Structures are given as structure tokens and as C-alpha cells.
Amino acid sequence: MILTEQQIARIIEMAWEDRTPFEAITYQFELSEQDVITLMRREMKSSSFRIWRQRVQGRATKHQKLRSFELGRYKCSRQK
């Protein structure tokens, strides 16, 4: 799948958001969690990537199955 610069920027933004699960990115862009990690590694500086990985690793809000609530908002106000 070929992504535009705008789509890549949106995926990075969603990946940084605490309340946006990887499943939302998969639903919108058909990218698995591993694909998102690969994209983040490729598009970010290595230091920024390390900070991001530490931040999301094991974070319950980034994984739908680990969330404590079933229905939660995962779209930002600018998202359609």
C-alpha cells in the first residue's frame, strides 16, 4: 500500500495519541501494529522513535483488548 505524505503524517499523529488504539489505525489505514512500528522507525529520528516505543509499550490505551472500557472515543476532533 502506497501512502501519501498526509496519510503518513496522520498515522504518526494517531500513533502518538494516548487514547488512539492500534486497531483504529488498522481500521482506517489497513496497517498492522508491526507496520505502524516500521513506519514510525522509518519516518522518525531514532531518538524520537525510542521515546515513542517506551511510551506505547504495554500502554493499555493503545491496545483495544487491554482497555478497561468497551466504548471509547478514539477519533480526534479534526478527524472525520
Image (cartoon, rainbow, N blue to C red):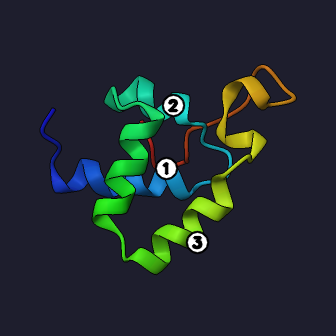
Please rate how many residues cluster around mark 2, counting C-alpha atoms within 10 Å: few if below 14, some from 14 to 19, many from 20: some
Please rate how many residues cluster around mark 1, counting C-alpha atoms within 10 Å: few if below 14, some from 14 to 19, many from 20: some
**Disc 3 on helix, strand or loop?**
helix
Quarter occupied by residue 3: top left
Quarter occupied by residue 75: top right
Earlier sequence position, callout 2 versus callout 1: 1
Q: Nearer the viewer, residue 1 or 80?
A: 1
Picture coordinates of residue 18, whole percent (x, y):
67, 52
Q: Give, as a three-letter code, the residue at label 2.
A: Ala
Q: Give, as a three-letter code, the residue at label 1.
A: Met
What's the distance in space between the residues labelled 2 and 3, CA to CA? 21 Å
Quadrant of the image containing the N terminus: top left
Give the labeled residue for mark 2. Answer: 24
Q: Give, as a three-letter code, the residue at label 3.
A: Ile
Picture coordinates of residue 31, whole percent (x, y):
35, 32
Give the labeled residue for mark 1. Answer: 14
Q: Is residue 23 left or right of residue 1?
A: right
What's the distance in space between the residues labelled 3 and 1, CA to CA? 15 Å
Quadrant of the image containing the C terminus: top left
**Disc 1 on helix, strand or loop?**
helix
Name the mark on residue 34.
Answer: none
Determine the residue positioned at 49% across, 49% down.
14
Determine the residue positioned at 48% across, 79% down.
47
Give the labeled residue for mark 3. Answer: 51
What's the distance in space between the residues labelled 2 and 1, CA to CA? 9 Å
